[in-house]
Image (spheres, grey):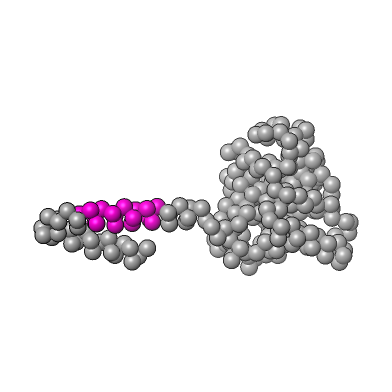
Amino acid sequence: MNFLAGFLVLLVILSYSSENMKNNKFRLYLAAIFTLFITLMTSAENNTSGNPSMETATFGMGCFWCSEAVFQDLKGVYKVESGYEGGHTKNPSYKEVCTGTTGHAEVIQVTYNPKEISYETLLEIFWKLHDPTTLNRQGADVGTQYRSVIFYHTPEQKAVAENFMQELNRQQVFPNPIVTQIAPAATFYKAENYHQDYYKLHGQEPYCQYVIKPKMEKLEKVFKEKLKAD
């Protein structure tokens, strides 16, 4: 693209030549090159905005306020959104999901660069920052919406998650068997705006201090080298 930009500048300079501007063929040629240049630039911009090198991971590990805060701090993670997934109701609201009747789990959808952080590392943090052995519960948060779940987006993610879980159970890393659900990704419904960036915006609230802050301290202690610079 730098070559094209330089070439376009050269053509513009040449266009100021009175002799060239009198040449209809030259003007048509210049217009064609300019159109091609704009098309290529637009295509490149679209490819960049689409982040072709990025991948998606989706995890449910209790309240999404906690999960979001943890994964936002990781190097290689570029976006984390809180939402709902795995249910049967279209466009569910937080109030509906909280009833436990929609089938959805509170989840986070993570956009990350696999060249900077691997899916295996994301899974390792997932396993260590919640209790995957309690069915439909994380601490005081009880209900199917708080279930431990991995929604995989590719066959590779499924295989890695299943093998990881089998190995953890084999080594008896946890005192009880893991009950985490591993399921294909379904429709992700982004949660209401007031749920996004919750810990960053409300870190001093009691829930954040007593529930989320200890997770962040554990993240800092166990995965310090994986965290973004302040």
Q: Which residue lies furthest to the left in this view?
A: 18
Q: Does the stretch in magenta take in 108? A: no
The quarter holding residue 193 reads: top right
Q: Give the mark count.
A: 0
- Closer-to-camera residue (194/39): 39
Q: Residue 32, image x and y in percent?
A: 28, 54
Q: In this view, does 105 lie above or below 172?
A: above
- Closer-to-camera residue (23/130): 23
Q: Is 47 situated left or right of 212 in this image?
A: left
Q: Taken as a whole, is the magenta stretch helix, strand or loop?
A: helix
- Closer-to-camera residue (160/79): 160
User: Which stretch is magenta?
Assistant: 27-42
- Closer-to-camera residue (158/57): 158
Residue drawn at x 79%, y 59% is: 162
Give the quadrant of the C terminus. Answer: bottom right
Q: Is 87 situated left or right of 2 in this image?
A: right
Visible residue check, residue 104? yes
Residue drawn at x 83%, y 62% is: 166
Q: Residue 183, image x and y in percent?
A: 76, 49
Residue drawn at x 65%, y 34% is: 91
Q: Residue 206, image x and y in percent?
A: 68, 43
Residue drawn at x 65%, y 43% is: 188
Q: Does the stretch in magenta take in 35? A: yes
Q: Is 89 situated left or right of 49 in this image?
A: right
Q: Residue 93, image x and y in percent?
A: 66, 33
Visible residue check, residue 213? no
Give the quadrant of the N terminus. Answer: bottom left
Q: Is 172 situated left or right of 217 in this image?
A: right
